[in-house]
Structure formats: structure tokens, C-alpha cells
Image: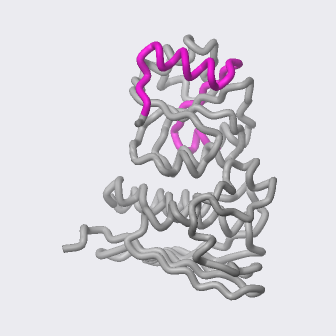
Amino acid sequence: MTLQEVAQLVDGEIVCGTGRAQEFVEYGFASDLMSDVLTQKRSNFLLITGLSNNQAIRTAEMSDAQYILFVRHKKATPDMLSLAADNDMVIIQSPFSMFKAVGILYSAGLRPVY
Amino acid sequence: MQLTFHVQGGDFTRAGDASSQVKKTLKQLNIDPGVTKRVVVALYEAEVNIVAHAYHGVITADIDPVRILLRLEDEGPGIPDIELAMQRGFSTASAEVREMGFGAGMGLPNILENADQFHIDSVVGKGTTLTIAVNLQPCP
């Protein structure tokens, strides 16, 4: 599905990387534990997290995950958005719980990394 | 090529800056993306460990045609029991570190998994030195 479709499905807003909204993402991984994210071998997945701080951006960068969906009403700070823009990332913010967002995206065809 | 970075303990706003610079350098050098990911995941976990546990530290990354050698030397409390620290799930991290998304006892095992060679030297009350090597070519 496209990132635009991801945003629509989770009642979200693309707040960084709007020019990449039509890019396709096939896999997703949800966690608030960054070391868990860093164990993923796959690249270019959608990181779904409620952890809103610089380390979420850095973890996505090191994991080659270019797309982040912040759930639970979490907002990226200006510092985070700057860091994400420097790394050419797409950030989406959603008011949904992680459970609800993940359920909707899985049902719509976003695949688990394992 | 050698890169050197200074890391301040407790400064979570800059945790990952060194790893990010190394990643950008490896990309410029056209290093294989899979190798680059292994290097920066190991380095980032180790960099976060300095920020989380030590007073300050120095990271050096030596890049040559055969391998990438990372050395992370910190001044800090040291590790009393390295074997225990290497166990998945063991952690002495503070609540602040856990709020950052770390501190689940996965850092050192993650480093080991991504490294071709990994060594820890630690002196309690003085500090810890990690040596991490990742080969650019598969071992014959």
C-alpha cells in the first residue's frame, strides 16, 4: 500500500516527507523497544511505534526503515522532524492506539516482517 | 581511513550522532548495504551504552579494504560480570534509559550478533572498552 493509504487508514497525517506519499510500503514492524527494532534484518519497513523521541528516528535510520508511524497521539518534535528530514524519512502521526493501527494495517494487507 | 567521535554520558539528544556519521561515510564509500547495517546497528547499540552507562567515551572507526574495526572506550563504572551482561534480558539500565526505548538487555547480544569479532575489556570503577570488527568480504 502507499504511504498515503497508510495515513488515511489510521486517520493520520504525514508530517515529514509529504513528497514521498505515493511510495509503496510492503512490511511493517511495531514496537516501543528500539533494541527489538534493531534486530530486524529487513530494510524499508514501516516502523510503528509510540516512542516519540530522537532515538526512534535514529533507530529507524540504523535499521534502514525510512517510514515511521507514530501512534497514540504521539507527536514528533521539531528536532525529530529535522533529524528525519536530514535522513529523507517519512513520518506519519496517528491518534489511534498501536493495537488499533496495527490491526487495521494488517487487515489492509501490510505484511509482518516475520 | 579513521574516524573519531567523543560521546558524552547522559546526553540522549546526541546519542546516535557518531553512528549516523559512520553510516553516511560507509554509504559514500559504496560499502555493501548489508554490511553497513550490521556495522551501524552494532555501533549504535554500543554508542547508546556509553550514553546510558558511562561518564564519557571515545569512538574510533577504522575503515580499510578488508574490514571495519570499531573501538569504543569509555570512562565509567565498568562491568562487574561480563558473562552476565552478555545474557539476553539482563540489564542495569535506569528508568530514563528504558524510557528511551532501550535497557531491555538486548544491546550486547545485538552487537555480538552483528559482529564478526567482538571483545569486551572492563575494569570496575574505571571503564569499558568494546572492540567490534565487521568484515567487508565473507570469510573464505
Q: Nearer the viewer, residue B126 or A77?
A: B126
Relative placement, left or right, of B29 versus A66 is left
**Residue B96: quarter of image:** bottom right
Q: Which residues are magenta?
A: A83-112
> Which quadrant is home to the N terminus of chain B?
bottom left
Total numbered circles = 0
- Apparent side of residue A69 relative to residue B69 in the rendered image (left or right): right
The x and y percentages for residue A17 are 55, 29
> Does residue B64 sit above or below B115 in this rendering?
below
Q: Residue at x 70, y 83 (%)?
A: B127
* In this view, A84 is above or below B137: above
Q: Residue at x 56, y 17 (%)?
A: A7
Q: What residue is at 42 percent from the left and 30 percent from the top?
A: A27
Q: Residue furthest left?
A: B140
- Residue drawn where x is 26% and y is 68% of the image: B137
Quadrant, the C terminus of chain B: bottom left
Query: Is A85 colored magenta in this rendering?
Result: yes
Position of residue B59 measured from the top left corner of the image (x, y, whole percent): 59, 75
Asked whether, in this view, residue B45 is left or right of residue A53, the answer is: left
Q: Is residue A2 magenta?
A: no
Residue A86 percent coordinates (x, y): 57, 44
Q: Nearer the viewer, residue A24 or B77?
A: B77
Q: Is residue A108 above or below residue A80?
A: above
The colour scheme used here is one colour
Q: Nearer the viewer, residue B47 or A34?
A: A34
Q: Position of residue B105 (x, y in %)?
A: 63, 59
Q: Is residue A77 left or right of residue B24?
A: right
Q: Quadrant of residue B121?
A: bottom right
